[in-house]
Image (tube, coloured by chain):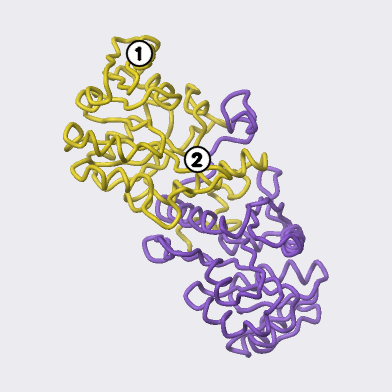
Chain colours: A yellow, B purple
Amino acid sequence: MRIGVLGTGAMADALATHWVRAGHEVFVGGRDEGKARRLASRLGGGTGHGSLSAAAGAGDVVLAALPYGVGAQVVGDLRAQLDGKVLLDCSNPVGPGFRLLTDGGPSAARRLAESAPGVRVVKAFNLCHEDVWRMSPPVFDGQRLAVPVCGDDDTALALVRELVRDAGCEPLSGGGLDRAGLVEATAALFIGLWVGEAADVRAMAPPLAFATGPGGTPTDS
Amino acid sequence: MRIGVLGTGAMADALATHWVRAGHEVFVGGRDEGKARRLASRLGGGTGHGSLSAAAGAGDVVLAALPYGVGAQVVGDLRAQLDGKVLLDCSNPVGPGFRLLTDGGPSAARRLAESAPGVRVVKAFNLCHEDVWRMSPPVFDGQRLAVPVCGDDDTALALVRELVRDAGCEPLSGGGLDRAGLVEATAALFIGLWVGEAADVRAMAPPLAFATGPGGTPTDS
């Protein structure tokens, strides 16, 4: 598929690397077009580069690899180019003290959707550090990293699930875009525990076979 | 320590069983005092029983094992008996469709704190099914279940960390009570994935050693 990338940072680099390798046609756009050129060159595979606006126009799916603080403004400015497209939001609205910056208001994903009402926003790829997304594939204890995907449009969700698989991961149905805020809150909790406490967040949950206790199954409850 | 238990349901039963076994003095209170008597009898160890008000008065730490929908009202009614005490909130404000019922407003823990301003509220024990808390101990792959604990008062946090250990688990510093909403949102995500998708939520996060990618450590980021 044709993928536009808004941004030239670590998440743009990590995810686009997988997608170029999987054979997708990628176009990187940056406010700093020199950075976009250098990232495109590093990605290889005929990756295009140019302005943010050009990247928004070039993709059927557009990755918003933008800091939370500027995402809604950038997407709002590009709403004409993005109209009808799938916008993939991987941002984390997490600030100093691992605080959830959206607390009490709409999620980061919802803010993007409100900035560009004709766009089909999907949330994914926000639960791990950029270097985890660079792993090829991210597999732990023989199990592929699972990626919850939230959105309201079935076609958009199917495209993003394919992109999750192309990154070597396993997509999970995270529910509608109204659940993106839960995944963002979970990221704020995880990041606080990883970075602030050096704690293993996996240890907070039982394995699936024990999710409702010994011998239980999740459908029991 | 002296522990009052508000409620006679599965969470009251699961957690109080650990605490009686650990030698604490437990008093179970219920709106239905017959249910409180039966639970106290099952728990053994000289467990007391009586009204909700009597349980609030009997504990230095009081477990609010109440449905989200009634918690704030019950705690508000008991605020005189609870004044100065530690109130442990294990509730999950999760409704039909695994929806977070507090979305856009204060967390369940914060609502309890607002209902009884003289009470030191601590959030813990909300991330797993009641049957997981019944396990003795809850250990998976050789690792004790980790329990994030959120609160603002150091003495209260120390008491609850001890109660987490007495349940066979490992306490984690989850941060202040302002982070209780993150743990509640994470529960809504986890429950939706477990029950709705039969998905292993542990697979969404890398192990600690990989939290910032291969060879990274969490303090790198």
Residue drawn at the location 68% of the way across and 84% of the way down: B81
Q: Which residue is mark 2?
A: B204
Q: Is residue B86 above or below residue B168?
A: below
Subunit bearing disc 2 = B
B78 sits to left or right of A182: right
Q: Where's the N terminus of chain B, which quadrant?
A: bottom right
SS at circle 2: helix
Separation of residues labelled 2 and 1 (CA atoms): 35 Å
A42 sits to left or right of A154: right
Q: Position of residue A40 (x, y in %)?
A: 34, 13
Same chain? Circles 2 and 1: no
Q: Which residue is mark 1?
A: A34
Q: Is residue A163 above or below residue B23?
A: above
Q: What residue type is disc 1 on?
A: Gly
Q: What residue type is disc 2 on?
A: Met
- Alpha-carbon neighbours of circle 1 within 10 Å: few (<14), some, or many (≥20)? some
Q: Hey, which quadrant is residue A70 in on the image?
A: top left
